[in-house]
Amino acid sequence: MTPEQIIKQAISKGQFVDAIQDAERQLKTLDNSQHKAQIIELLYLKGVAYRLSGNLQNAIDCQKRILSLHASHSRAHQELGYVYRASAKPLESASHFYQATQSNPALLSSWKTLYEHYKSTDNQTALNLAQVQLDYLNALPKPILHARDLMYEGQLHKANQLCRQYLQTDKHHPEGMLLLAEIGIALKVYGEAEFLLESCLTLYPEHKAAGIEYLKLLSKMGRFQAAKDLAEKLDAAHPAHPPIMVAKASAMVGLGEIDAAIELYQALLAKTPEQAGLQLLLGHAFKAAGKLDDAIRAYQTAYKQKPDFGDAYWSLANTKTYVFSDTEIQDMQTQANLDIDEDDKIHFYFALGKSYEDRNAFTESFEYYAKGNALKQAQTGYKPQALETQINKQKQVFISSVFAQLENQGCQRPDPIFVLGLPRAGSTLLEQILASHSQVDGTMELHNILGLAAKLNGPSNRYPEIITSLKPDYFARFGEQYLQETQAYRGNAPRFIDKMPNNFIHIGLIKLILPNAKVIDARREPMACCFSGFKQLFAEGQEFTYGLDNISHYYKHYVELMNHWDEVLPGFVLRVKHEDVIEDLEGQVKRMLDFCGLQFEQACVDFHKTKRTIKTPSSEQVRQPIFKDSMLQWKNYSAPLQEMHDFFVAEGLIK
């Protein structure tokens, strides 16, 4: 048996002293940085043993230590609820039971206790909400309830196994299908999740929860037209249901229908003004439209309504132009030191890093950036070995003979211009330059190539090896499908830009399905690029950026793969260095336009005057003329970045 199992057995037998001593012995052998999950489990069991033995203060100390390591740990909050209830502190007890249900809505015992509390305090609104959740949880088959609990606790593979076992006996159970899809989304198996949700809605067209989850997935996959269509369909079945309306507005932002989305957000806020999350989304819409003052007001309203709303502060920092006041910095520091949700804490750390950078307090700035990165890296569980495997496979499969064999089998249309590379390498600037041309539509970071690669990969990891066994006519079909799916994001121009940076991994696939597409590699000097990525908190993906070691190795592998594409596809990729664009804007503009077969237009040089929707972190920067300040910003942090600098020197990437 494991040490944890031995301690659990001692607790079940009432041997609390033995359980506490065993936990203490194990804790002395563990290192915080290497064994965080095990430390949390041992502290939890130790705290339970203390509570059951009547030592309530020690029980509180154990659970609070857990919350210092993992602020949203649902079981720790639930256990504190029990301790404070035993201490005759009903308000503290109810507060922790509530926080437990926010992290894990499947905690039946916490909901039951909250129900009794709301009943005793005559809080009818909260009582009704608790009753609805209790009815829902009690109606779930026990295996599905247990699997849902496991999912919220982060035990995704156990939840997946248990859910699949149940669906073998009742394969069309709606809650089972929904849960398996949610687990798939958490595991980023989007194709299977989409199939499950689509099947669930086919069988149960008015299943509101499945519909809302499908809306979230479609937006996550960048399929905004499908999301908008589904939202309108669900609205007919569930009129004016706020989550559906919010999802519709978010899809409209994705489609560039910004003004209509803003109107919808504002209409929802007019009915219920105290919605910090909705104010945040409204701010994002204003920012995408270039209405920065309105965006700032919305973000400020959001944090005033919810002081621990880290994302509101980070969104202000992420405008790249907002300067925090002394009061705002003090408020962020206060909130970051409280037992708040881990995501909020991460947002506060990144925002504080930016606020101190703006004040030239670079030591404090780096400390906050490092704290945010450490927490985020622990959350993502990024494994650099997976990238190495993926890149090696690309190099092994996509060789010159494959392109010679399948030459011109794909769709021949020249519409797309792929701008790719690493995030924070200047791709938004290149997109803005090209989208200022009368013959080119700017779109966004389209997920379609990544989605095609994921479908080819399937559950058995067949991509890219499957490429050599596909029938040649598949490539034209894939190219045509790509153009059809991306049509919703285009205007009337004959050419358009796909700015998904991660597409650099799939240049071989792009060449096979769209041989006449243009590919531009946005390249930035490694220190500037990697440090810019390190201090950026991304809304989704880019897990490799959280940690200097991870991001520097990722840059190295990116360069290696780009060198491979240059070798097997000579002339297919145009490399544009960010530093060259800054030093010789007009020369690089002409170079890109020539590569794309486009006539020179002065508007491309005057790119900052172009009015269009931009949803990346650089949105405000590319609405201004080019500036050189960012080229050497990393040198303000030269001491903590020395190891990364030495790595790049050793790899020959810088001199």
Image (cartoon, rainbow, N blue to C red):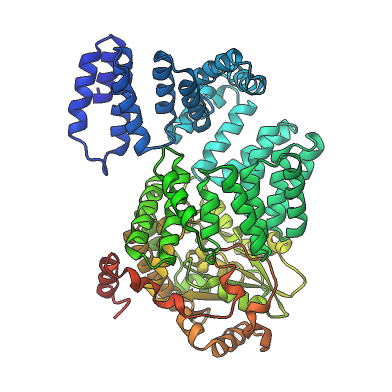
Above/below status of 94 relative to 181 = above
Residue 600: image location, x then y, percent: 66, 89
Residue at the extreme top of the image, as rendered:
13
Residue at (61, 27) in percent of width and height: 175
Above/below status of 510 relative to 150 = below
587 sits left or right of 71 in the view: right
Residue at (31, 60) in percent of width and height: 549
545 sits left or right of 255 in the view: left
Residue at (21, 14) in percent of width and height: 17
Q: Quadrant of the C terminus?
A: bottom left
Above/below status of 42 relative to 315 = above
Q: Quadrant for residue 82, please give it.
A: top left
Residue 419 visible, this angle: no
Residue 494: image location, x then y, percent: 73, 75
Residue 560: image location, x then y, percent: 37, 71
59 sits left or right of 273 in the view: left
